[in-house]
Image (tube, rainbow, N blue to C red):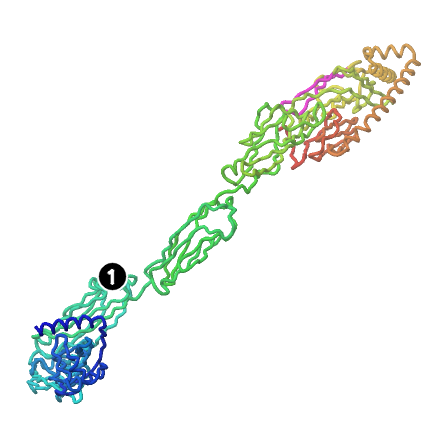
Amino acid sequence: MGVSWCSVLRVVVVVQAAWSLVADQVRYSVPEEAKAGTVVGRLLQDLGLEAGEAESRRLRLVSQGRRASVEVSGASGALVVSSRLDREELCGKSAPCALRLEVLVERPLRVFHVELEVTDINDNAPLFPAARKNLSIAELTTLPGSRFPLEGASDADVGANAELSYTLSPSEHFRVDTQKSNERNIVPDLVLTKPLDRETLPVHRLVLTASDGGRPSLTGTMELLISVLDANDNAPTFNQSVYKVQLPESAAEGTLVVRVNATDPDEGINSEVTYTATNFFPLSGRDVITVNPQTGEIRLSGALDFEEVSIFDFRIEARDKGTPPLSGHCSVELEVLDVNDNAPEVWVTSLSVPVSEDAAVGTVVALLSVSDRDSGSNGRVRCAVWPASPFGLVSTFAGSYSLVLREALDRERVSEYEVEVRAEDGGSPPLRASRGVRVPVSDVNDNAPAFAQAVYTVLARENNAAGAELARVWARDPDEAGNGRVSYSVWEGGVGGASSGGGWRSASSYVSVDAESGRLWALRPLDYEEVQVLQFEVRAVDAGEPSLCGNATVQVFVVDENDNAPALLPASGGGAWSGSSSEAASVPGSGSVWAWASWGTPAGQVVAKIRAVDADSGYNAWLRYELWEPRGKGPFRVGLYSGEVSTARALEEADGPRQRLVIVVRDHGEPSLSATATLSVSLVEGGEAALAAAGSSSSSSLSGVGLRPAEGGASVSSSAATNVWLVVAICAVSSLFLLAVVLYVASRWAPRAAVLSGPGAATLVCASEVGSWSYSQRQSRSLCVADGAGKSDLMVFSPNFPPPPPPAPVPAAKETHPEAPALLDTVSGPPFLASRPF
């Protein structure tokens, strides 16, 4: 009952003390193998307890799962060794080795933690797994330096006490070497230092000693029993350990790379060597390289390509036929040399076409990429563009170029460029590649239509049909599409030449132009006598935006046609009253001419002159006179071009009182047109002829006031018979009348001459000719013939075109130019010869 109460009391005390439990920790260290009773530490003092409290408070030591091997001295309260401490037994190879103890005291209940570290001492020697190790090594076949791994010793201690070193008993053939297999393990190797020879020493006995790092050091030993084997003791040996070979990548299949050679000093079968290639890097070398097993020749079995593999590494094994077979090895390094076998490659990565012809200089047209698979100088590429203009290359970065515009474009000169980008590498010989780039040029409206001629000279026959094509103008616009589509129109200009109504007329009333073809046609027939020259402008306009235009001047020269017959003018007579006389008169409105001549008139005397004009020009207006009747040899003749009727011989009474002459006036046109004049010549005495002349003058005066004279010969006879004074009076009146007519004509001719000499009028050049004055006048050309000259003249007239519209020109009759061979016309441009009708 008392024991139960005591147990309950302890439980209560423990529960009450649990709330005030303080866990303090104390650390001690003690070397292993310390003798029993060795004081580890003053536990009571270190825990802060008073002396004597160990028993009163029932101090006791509790270990956690292990034998403590220490105890608390009851008298002194010190912690002392109670039994043998063996660190290797307690902790093995763990370091540090710490024992955790708990110290309990009661009244009040407290727990103290005590950590006891057992330190290692060198109490364990190294220990090999076996006391003896047997090795077999072939004689002479194992080369010096050969290594043979051995099992190392172990030491149960830790730290420096477990650090082992190995020594080998003295030997001229072997030595020991150590290697770390990991951070804590050192493995010994037996290294052969000198070849073995079984015939000299068949067995080698060696002792391998392992020493730890303790103080003093402990050792362990193992006996090595090495048996020397008698066998194929010479391995094949190459004359080089590394063969370095260089071959160009163009080397053909079957090319010898190198011949390797390994020798074996053995005899017989032990000296026969075979070769094999192994350890290819890269593995593709197996398909490219082969070795002859008997000769050791290494040849190419495939094509080399520097761009794929530049170096082949492999090993050659030479193996003899001994038992066991021995082998030797060497390395072969095949370096492939680059040859210039790859041409440059050019790609167009971007293309911006078409390029507008007004694109600015520097515009990027295309982006190109250039590369060469070769290396070194073989892979350095130079690029150029052909043609050198108007494009150029600009290098943006390595292998990239920009095709840029270097000069202004003109689509009309070149509408499309075939640009060739040429690449050349630096090899020898260099390889080249090219890439064509088609660069079309788009059009802008930068060209105005341009006529083939600035001035078109057109010859058009008069009386042409309305709608007849006169000419075709053509303007070229080098632009394309709408920019080059040209339409034509007549731009109003002046009309050269005189019209029947006077003044200048619009060109559009005479001609028109087809808007698309440029064909000029006449709107109505042209009349040379009305208009000789049409001058106007044709305008060509393209369909661009904005539109551009060009002009050309068209000069239409109307070529005369022989559409006007000669017209007779009043005849004129002449002569002298001494000896013989002649006089001529004409009846107005008729083709009959009267003339008087006296008998005895000598040959060559002009009796009368037939005057005629032709409204045409040139050859069409050049008249000739022919005596149609009487035919044969008569007393009279007619000047071929002058129209003068003169005596062919002296007149006689036998010729009769009257001669009737029929004169035909013809022009030179094709076909020629003609007019007929009848000349009646009365043959009288000299005095009668004078009276007849006076009568004819009176008749002419009377005809001028509307009176018609009587029949020629009758009037003269009647006047002479009546009264001589009457004749004198009539002659006086006629003379006054003629004077008045001359003054009137002179007054009218002065302003007309002023008009002809003004701007734009033709210069009048006259030449004298036998007979009276006559003229032929046109605004574009003038011909004047004067009496008294015996030669023909050639005139050139140069009117100024285009003039401002002049005053209305004065119409004038046109006469012949006697014996004129040709007429040269010049009008606002190159002269043209009007020798024949066009």
> Left or right: where does residue 52 sit relative to residue 621?
left
Task: Give x and y (percent) for residue 219.
Answer: 13, 87
Q: Main secondary structure of the magenta part?
A: strand
* Displayed quadrant of residue 186: bottom left
**Amino acid marked by disc 1:** Ala
Q: Foreground: 824 or 100?
A: 100
Q: Looking at the image, is 62 positioned above or below residue 594?
A: below
Q: Position of residue 732 (x, y in %)?
A: 91, 18
692 to the left or right of 156: right
Magenta span: 659-679
659, 700: nearer the viewer: 700
Classed neighbour count for the residue bearing mark 1: other residues with Cα under 10 Å, few (<14), some (14–19), many (≥20): some
What residue sits 58% from the left and 29% below the top?
A: 513
What residue sits right under mark 1 in the picture?
303
Image quadrant in which you'd find residue 264: bottom left
Residue 664: within the magenta? yes
Res. 154 in view: no
> Which residue corresponds to the image point at 54% horizontal and 38% vertical from the top-left?
544
Q: Is residue 350 above or below residue 710?
A: below
Q: Nearer the viewer, residue 788 or 148?
A: 148
Q: Describe residue 450's horizontal placement relative to residue 774 as left or right.
A: left
Q: Is residue 494 visible?
A: yes
Does residue 318 show up magenta in the picture? Answer: no
Please say if 137 is above or below 473: below
